[in-house]
Image (cartoon, grey):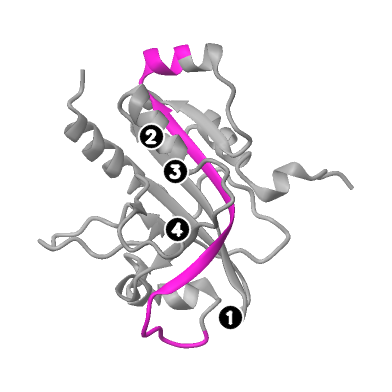
Amino acid sequence: MVPLRSLDHLVRRRLQQWPQRPPGLNKQPVREAWLRCRPGDPSNSPIPPAQPFLKFPGSNRMRTLPDGLWLNFGGTPDEPFADIFAIEACGSLQNLLDKRSRFAPSTRSLLAVCPVSWLMAPVMPGDPTPRWKATRVLRGEPIVPLVLPVRDIRVMYALKQRQYKGFAECQLPQPHEYFVPMETLVAEDAHENPALRELVSRASVRSNFYQGT
C-alpha cells in the first residue's frame, strides 16, 4: 500500500502536468477563461504560494482545498461568477465520504476565493500574462482577493482499484460526480489518456444540451 503522504505527493505532481483547461473538455461557443488553481506550478520557495480555495459565505476557517481545482471565470466585471472542476484523490472510503459531503447539493452558496498574490502571478511558466487579466472579469490590478459565487460544480473522485470496483458496483453517483481509478489518475501522462479525457469531456455545462444542427 502506498503511504498516504507519498500518494498525496504523487497526485500533486501528476496534476501539475495538467493544462490550464481540463484535458478533454471541449471548447464551447460561449466565452470561457479556464485557469488551473490547484496544484500550483512547481516552486523552489520555502513558503508555498497562495492558491485559490473554496468556502461558504461568512466562514473564515472552514475552507475546501481540493487536490485539483480549475476555475472557469465568467460573467462581467459587475456580475462575475465561476464554474469549477475539482479533483479529489481519496485514500479510503471514509475519506471519500468526507470529501463528497463538501460538494453535496446544499441550500448554501459556495464561494471561490482567489488571493491577490495568485492573481498577480503569471498564468504559467513561459506566459507572463498576469492571471487577473486572463480572468477577463477584472478591470484593473486587484488590491483585495477576488471572491466569486460558484455557478456550476463538477467533481472527479479517484479511488484505489479495490474501492473503486466496489463503489461502482453498488453506488449511484450524483449528477455532478465522476469517478476514476486512482491508478489511472496517477499514471504517467494521465492527462493524455483518451478514456480519461472522454470522461472529463462530460464535465461541461453544455453536455446537458443537444449538440446537433
> Which residue in the structure is indicated by mark 2?
98
* Secondary structure of the residue carrying numbered label 3: helix
Query: Residue, x 39% and y 38% (percent of image)?
Result: 88
Query: Residue, x 38% and y 75% (percent of image)?
Result: 145
Q: Counting residues from the N terminus, which is met first, the one under dot 1 or under dot 2?
A: 1
Q: How far is the residue under mark 4 from the one under mark 3?
A: 10 Å
In the image, residue 16 lies at what x, y percent?
A: 32, 49
In the image, residue 204 lies at what x, y percent?
A: 64, 47
> Which residue in the structure is indicated by mark 3?
102
Q: Which mark is residue 56?
A: 4
Q: Are marks 3 and 2 in contact (CB under 8 Å)?
A: yes
* Secondary structure of the residue carrying numbered label 2: helix
Q: Amino acid at mark 1?
A: Pro
In the rendered image of this protein, does residue 70 appear above or below residue 143? above
Residue range in magenta is 139-166
Residue 29 in view (yes/no): yes
Q: How far is the residue under mark 4 from the one under mark 2?
A: 16 Å
* Secondary structure of the residue carrying numbered label 4: loop
Q: Residue furthest right?
A: 213
In the rendered image of this protein, does residue 94 appear above or below residue 170? below
Query: Residue, x 69% and y 56% (percent of image)?
Result: 28
Question: Which of the image's four quarters has the N terminus?
Answer: top left
In the image, residue 100 lies at what x, y percent?
A: 46, 36
Q: Counting residues from the N terminus, which is met first, the one under dot 4 or under dot 2?
A: 4
